[in-house]
């Protein structure tokens, strides 16, 4: 099958834009969970063995989709299913990644460069083992171990973490609960500002899970319900403050929204390209045997 044309891709982009508004879901937008879908599809990459990554959309199958780290992402896949049916010319792997960049832009974030050409054929020998995605209960060493494996450096780790400006944690998905910022469907550098500004206190949930919380006492005094004004951070978010090398970047991104947007766009584009080698002249993927076989 041939690659979709630019006009066809524009139709897909328009359909994703329309789908983002979901008044009955979470904070009213499918955007955050679509961003997480793309990140988890790509974030399994291992530079050494060249396994994992967004190509193949392996999360459709139990081996990868059933990884507890991916709990809840079936909602994102379900949101996109009607678009896949309407536009069968785009592969799942391309649709998931394209949807995330449309969502980021629509939520007020930067334009993330996106290239297509991924196939939907999963080579079993290259399926990533479970456990390649980060564990939020850990600290800075774990973050480096996970993200260096993908080929990222400290600055890139912090920039990527700024995505926690979007969406929320769901007790029935990850065990953690709550949102990082007050407006979780608007892309900004608020996550870094709040991380620095408040005195985050450890909080143990009824389940025994530990996270960090900050309650805006003035808002509570003014009559706002606590659930509305309580914000959260994961242990891994706090590690960005505690580690001096990470903290340098937290400071920069808290102070300079444009710098964060620029760095986020670059690193998110890099994330979506992990494992794909392209012909510099044509942009075509050249390391995917499935293309030679005619699979998509
Ligand atoms: Fe994340 N993230 N993430 N995250 N994440 C969660 C939710 C989102 C970690 C843990 C969690 C990135 C990095 C990390 C998003 C984007 C990114 C949740 C709650 C946990 C736990 C899941 C739930 O309960 O639904 C950890 C650990 C790391 C380590 O660095 C990166 C990188 C990105 C993207 C660039 C987004 C968006 C969400 C919100 C999802 C939603 O459904 O609202």
Image (cartoon, grey):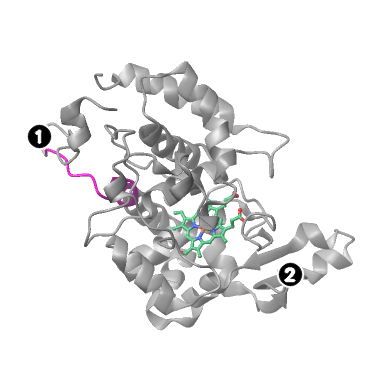
Q: Which residues are magenta?
A: 269-279
Are the residues flagged by discs 1 and 2 in contact, CB closer than 8 Å?
Answer: no
Please tell me the numbered disc located at residue 194: none
Please tell me the numbered disc located at residue 281: 1
**Percent coordinates x, y for residue 146 in the rendering:** 37, 67
- The quadrant in which residue 290 appears is top left
CA gap, disc 1 and disc 2: 54 Å
Residue that carries the numbered disc 2 in the rendered image: 207
Q: Crowdedness of circle 1 by 10 Å Cα count: few (<14), some, many (20+)?
A: few
Quick check: 237 above or below 56? below
Question: In which quadrant of the rendered image does the N terminus lie?
Answer: top left
Q: Crowdedness of circle 2 by 10 Å Cα count: few (<14), some, many (20+)?
A: few
* N-term-proximal mark, 1 vs 2: 2
| Furthest-left residue in this view | 281
Quick check: 182 above or below 98? below
**Percent coordinates x, y for residue 240 in the rendering:** 47, 74
Q: Secondary structure at mark 1?
A: loop
Quick check: 198 above or below 1? below
């Amino acid at each position: 099958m041939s690659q979709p044309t630019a006009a066809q891709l524009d139709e897909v982009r328009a359909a994703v834009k329309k789908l983002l508004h979901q008044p009955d879901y979470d904070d009213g937008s499918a955007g955050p969970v679509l961003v997480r879908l793309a990140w988890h599809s790509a974030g399994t990459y291992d530079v050494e063995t060249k396994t994992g990554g967004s190509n193949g959309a392996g999360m459709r199958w139990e081996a990868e989709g059933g990884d507890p780290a991916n709990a809840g992402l079936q909602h994102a896949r379900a949101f996109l299913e009607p678009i896949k049916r309407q536009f069968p010319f785009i592969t799942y792997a391309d649709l998931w990644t394209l949807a995330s960049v449309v969502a980021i832009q629509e939520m007020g974030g930067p334009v993330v460069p996106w290239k297509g050409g991924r196939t939907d054929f999963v080579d079993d020998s290259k399926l990533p083992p479970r456990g390649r995605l980060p564990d939020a209960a850990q600290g800075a060493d774990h973050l480096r171990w996970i993200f260096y494996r993908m080929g990222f450096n400290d600055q890139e780790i912090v920039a990527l973490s700024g995505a926690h400006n979007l969406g929320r944690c769901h007790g029935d998905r990850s065990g953690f609960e709550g949102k990082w910022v007050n407006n979780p469907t608007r892309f900004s550098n608020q996550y870094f500002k709040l991380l620095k500004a408040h005195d985050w206190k450890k909080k143990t949930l009824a389940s025994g899970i530990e996270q960090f919380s900050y309650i805006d006492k003035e808002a509570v005094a003014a009559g706002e319900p606590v659930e509305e004004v309580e914000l959260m951070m994961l242990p891994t978010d706090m590690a960005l403050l505690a580690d001096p090398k990470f903290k340098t970047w937290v400071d920069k991104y808290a102070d300079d929204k444009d710098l964060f947007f620029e760095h986020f766009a670059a690193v998110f584009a890099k994330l979506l390209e992990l494992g794909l080698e392209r012909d510099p002249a044509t942009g075509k993927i050249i390391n995917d045997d499935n293309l030679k076989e005619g699979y998509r």
